Amino acid sequence: MTNTLTDNNQIKVISSFSELINTNFQGEINALCWSRSLAGDFKEIVNKLELKENITEVSVDDLLALQLSEHGNFAREIILKDIQLLTDFGASPSLNLLKSYERDDELDFISTDVYSYHIDRSPIETDTFLCTYHGAASDILPNDQVEQKILIPEIREKLKKLHDGTEAEFETFLEEYFFDLHYQAKPNAKPVNLGLGHLWRLAVDHPTQQVLPCVHRAPAENEGEYRLLLIC
């Protein structure tokens, strides 16, 4: 079951880029959504871009080189404007054409790839911005609807056997291999799909953050369809 933007206490919906970057996270709110209904043919852009590997970074020059219809050009202008807004803000946006991310299937009892619910962590004050223009979109979950995987007894015991060291070293081991960033959805959890065209700002775990970091995951891709994602 999936929640909507308006019935979720962790999301604040706003109506401009200025509001997106100037609104503070507070209380349960750790996801801000600049809600948009975008005109333009983003599928045309995806079809004309060349996938060079499973994740291909698309440059501004790559975009500008495309021969597009009027509706394709509308879509390109929107992407270029988003890149400029984020760059002027001081972020480093990356436009990615995605077939799939790398899967982590080394351990059968815990996954640390982006398809697993996880948080982002940074040593500096920053947030995660993302917008899906085409293809499947990411999900987020409220923090009270997830459990940190390393606190689930059977997973923790298996990780301890894998580590085979002291308790103090074990906590460092969990951080070093990013096990502590990953979460399991509780029964009856209601994920929110981030949808197409909306520009999101998600709270990250860093020393000055006043709220819990936003738990999110990459979606399973739709069969035969690439994703076009702006992220920083």
Image (tube, grey):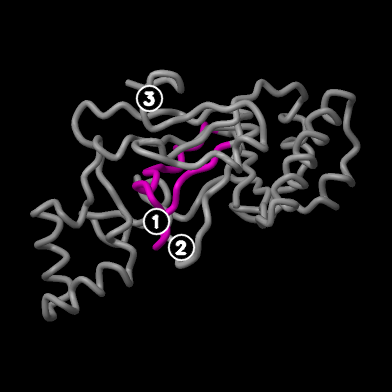
Q: Secondary structure at mark 2?
A: loop
Does 68 sit left or right of 20 as displayed? Answer: right
**Depth check, front residue: 179 or 127:** 127
Asked if the residue at tag 1 contacts the one at tag 2, i.e. Cβ–Cβ closer than 8 Å, the answer is yes
**Residue 203 drawn above or below residue 79:** below
Figure quadrant of the N terminus:
top left
Residue at image mark 1: 205
Of the residues under marks 1 and 3, which one precedes in the sequence? 3
Please, what is the dominant secondary structure of the magenta stretch? loop
Q: Is residue 212 magenta?
A: yes
Residue in the image at 77% along x and 47% along y: 84
The residue under the point 81% across, 50% down is: 60
Give the mark nearest the N terminus, 2 or 3.
3
In the image, what residue occupies the spot 13% across and 60% down? 156
For the residue carrying disc 1, how many other residues have a C-alpha within 10 Å: few (<14), some (14-19), or many (20+)? many
Crowding at dot 2, Cα within 10 Å, few <14 / some 14-19 / many 20+, comes out as few
Q: Distance of mark 1 from mark 3, alpha carbons?
A: 21 Å
Cα gap from disc 2 to disc 1, whole angstroms: 6 Å
Image position of 109 (left or right of 218): left
Q: Which residues are magenta?
A: 200-223
Q: Is residue 80 left or right of residue 141?
A: right
- Along the viewing direction, whichever of 26 and 5 lies nearer the viewer: 26
Give 206 or 108, whichever is nearer the viewer. Answer: 206
Please give the label number shown on residue 8: 3
Distance from the alpha carbon under mark 2 to that under mark 3: 26 Å
- SS at mark 3? loop
| Mark carried by residue 122 | 2
Give x and y (percent) for residue 100.
53, 47
Looking at the image, residue 183 lies above or below residue 19: below
